[in-house]
Amino acid sequence: MNPTLKLATIVLIALEISFTQVWSVNVCLIIVGLAILLGTHVRLRTLLWLTIVPLFFASSLVWSLMLRGNATNHFLLVLFTRTFVYVYLGATFTQTTTTLELTRSLEQNAKLPSKFAYGFLAAFNLFPKIRAEVATVRAAALMRGQVLHVWSPQLYFKVILTAMTWSEQLADAMTSHGYVEGAPRTYAVTVPLHLKDWLYFIGSLILVQIGLVIGLP
C-alpha cells in the first residue's frame, strides 16, 4: 500500500476510535494489526515489547478507574482495547514502511514541499549523532566536575546549538549540490499511487464505519 495512504488510513482510524466506544471494533483492529505484524515476520522480542508495555499501561489505567468506581465495564473494556489498537496499528506502519519511503511518498504523492521532506529526513537521520553529542557534552561536563542530568537545561542548550550548526552545514551542502528551493525536480525513485491503493484506503475506512455502526448500542 502507498505509504501516504497507509499513514492516512491509520491516523483516521485512530482518530475515529478515539471518539467512539465500540470495543468489538477495537478487538477486530487488534486482530488485523497482529496478523499484519506476524505476516511481516516481526521479531518475537519486538512483539513482546509491543504487548507487554501497553498491557502495563492499559491495566494501570483500568485499575485506577476501577478504584474510583464511576466507570462502567463497557467503558473500561473500550479503554483497555483502544490502547492496543494504537500500538499495533502504529507498529504495522513502522514495521512495513521505512522513513525514506514515507518521505518520498509525502513529497511526491502528498505534495509536501521538498524542504520539509528533506528536513524531516535529515532530522531523523541525525538522531544517532544527537545521541552521541549528548554523551559528549555530559562527558565534558563530568571532566569539569559538573553533573548534567537528563533534565538539565544546559545539556539540551548545547546540543541545540550544535544541531543548528549542523543544519547550516547541511543547507550549504545541499546548495552546493544544485538544490534550489521551489525549482522543478526529478526523482531518482518514483512512488506510484495505484488504483488498488485507493481501494485499500477507502475499503478499510468503509469496513471500520460498518463495524462502528453495527457495534453501537
Image (cartoon, rainbow, N blue to C red):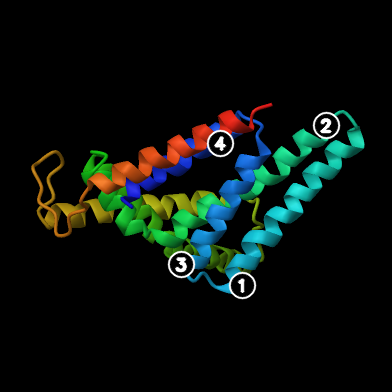
Label 2, label 1: how far apart the Cα atoms are: 34 Å
What's the residue at 34%, 50% (across, down)? 3
Q: Earlier in the sequence, mark 2 or mark 1?
A: 1
- Amino acid under disc 4: Gly
Q: Which label was assigned to residue 72? A: 2
- Amino acid under disc 3: Thr
Label pair 3/1, CB-CB below 8 angstroms: no
For mark 3, give the secondary structure: loop
Label pair 2/4, CB-CB below 8 angstroms: no
What's the residue at 66%, 32% (across, down)? 21
- Mark 2, residues whose alpha carbon is within 10 Å: few (<14), some, or many (≥20)? few
What's the residue at 49%, 60% (across, down)? 36
Q: Name the residue under label 1.
A: 45
Q: Which label was assigned to residue 206? A: none
Residue 52 vs residue 197: left or right? Answer: right
- Nearest to the observer: residue 144 or residue 116: 116
Q: Name the residue under label 4.
A: 211
Q: Which of marks 1 and 4 is nearer the N terminus?
A: 1
Q: Mark 3 points at which residue?
A: 40
Label 3, label 1: how far apart the Cα atoms are: 14 Å
**Is 205 rendered above or below residue 153?**
above
For mark 2, give the secondary structure: loop
